[in-house]
Image (cartoon, rainbow, N blue to C red):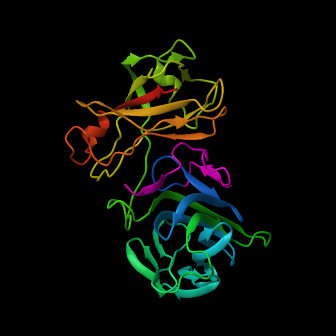
Amino acid sequence: MTRILSEGFEMQDLVGYSTSTGSINTTTKRSGGASIALDDGEYFHYVVSDLTEVYVRFAIYWAGNGTTRAFYLICRHGTTELTRLYINLLSGNLVAVQVGSTTQDTGVIPISTGAWYVIEFRVKIDDATGVLDTKVDGVSDATFSGDTKPGADAHIDNLLFYNGSGGGLGENMVIYLDDIGINNTAGGVDDSWLGDGRIIVIKPNGDTATLQLTPSAVVDHNTLVDDIPADGDTTYVEGSTVDERDIYDLAACGLTDVIITRIWTEARAKDTASSGKTIALITKASGGAEVSGGDIALAGTYTTKVLGAEELENPVDTNPWEVADIDALQGGPKTRS
């Protein structure tokens, strides 16, 4: 699998993105319960392993007034800009692509205020056969092929989603981002355009017979782990014996007429003794065995984005996920070391 990020801000925090600014917004969102709001000069930052080619999808909504609003998705090596996609009111709210500081093409589809748009950006870094391609709601827009290597750097190691509006000019410009996805080109799956996609969260809503962790209060265990955003040390379950686990029933997803392309578990956790202890997250489809994600090392604070295994199909029958499968899912944490 080559999906390297799926982010809908459904946990309503920025855990795992230590250099990002902005704030979680639960009013203006495209899907699920939240988005990230970027005010003037704020950004969402994601670090990647060195990539020469990447596909990015994001949904964007901008609101406000003024004449200098702008959005940038910048592909960088360190702090050096290689390429960027930008949208600027001064160019008719059109998508444009740059190599270094030079604009190579401007699209024709306006990105107006007060509406959600899905934008995709393909970047291939090469000094002869490089590519910059964009899509707006699935329609091809600004494009360029040729030299996309403005200097010596040949790899992208971070992406910066940036609100470059003109702060301090009496303007009020906020950009909302949701349903972000990033693919690299390895592995033969998820190695190209992402297309449309929406991300939602399904919370625990019932206990199963497997409850081996210690609850912070004498109540149903699932009620201690269903807080969004997570409430830290207020309610929790904990364990210290390897492979102790809690398994919970999950709420019905409420979906209809959808194609479900992936599921994963996500949690916030810490090591109460010494940093470095590990946990894993489990999913269990109806009629199947537990599927465990990799062991995740914890810090002494709730600063770790704990992810379980990403599953593209139901492991019981190896068919695509169906709504009934999702509604019958169970999941939970287990201690590992």
For the stretch drawn in magenta, the main secondary structure is loop
Q: How many marks?
A: 0
Residue 259 in the image: x percent, y percent?
Answer: 28, 53
| Left or right for 13, reference 31 | right
Snapshot quadrant of residue 97: bottom right
* Residue 22 magenta-highlighted: yes
Can residue 108 be seen here? The reply is: no
Which image quarter holds the N terminus? bottom left
The answer to whether residue 79 is left or right of residue 268 is right
Position of 23 relative to 317 (above/below): below
- Looking at the picture, tell me which residue is in the foreground, 77 or 94: 77
| Residue sitting at the far right | 168
Vertical order, 117 against 48 (above or below): below
| Residue 226 point in image, percent of width and height | 50, 30
Q: Nearer the viewer, residue 147 or 230?
A: 147
Query: Who is closer to the viewer here, 331 or 48?
Result: 48
Q: Looking at the image, which residue is at 47% across and 75% down?
A: 124
- Determine if residue 229 is in view: yes
Q: Is residue 103 above or below residue 234?
A: below
Q: Residue furthest front?
A: 152
Q: Residue 119: horizontal and vertical position, in percent?
A: 47, 69
Is 85 magenta? The answer is no
Does residue 256 appear left or right of residue 182 in this picture?
left
Closest to the observer, 155 or 44: 155
**Residues in magenta, as a range:** 1-28
Residue 3 position (above or below residue 275):
below
* Residue drawn at x 34%, y 45% as measured from the top left: 311
**Residue at point 53%, 49% (across, down):** 9
Q: Position of residue 274 (x, y in %)?
A: 66, 27
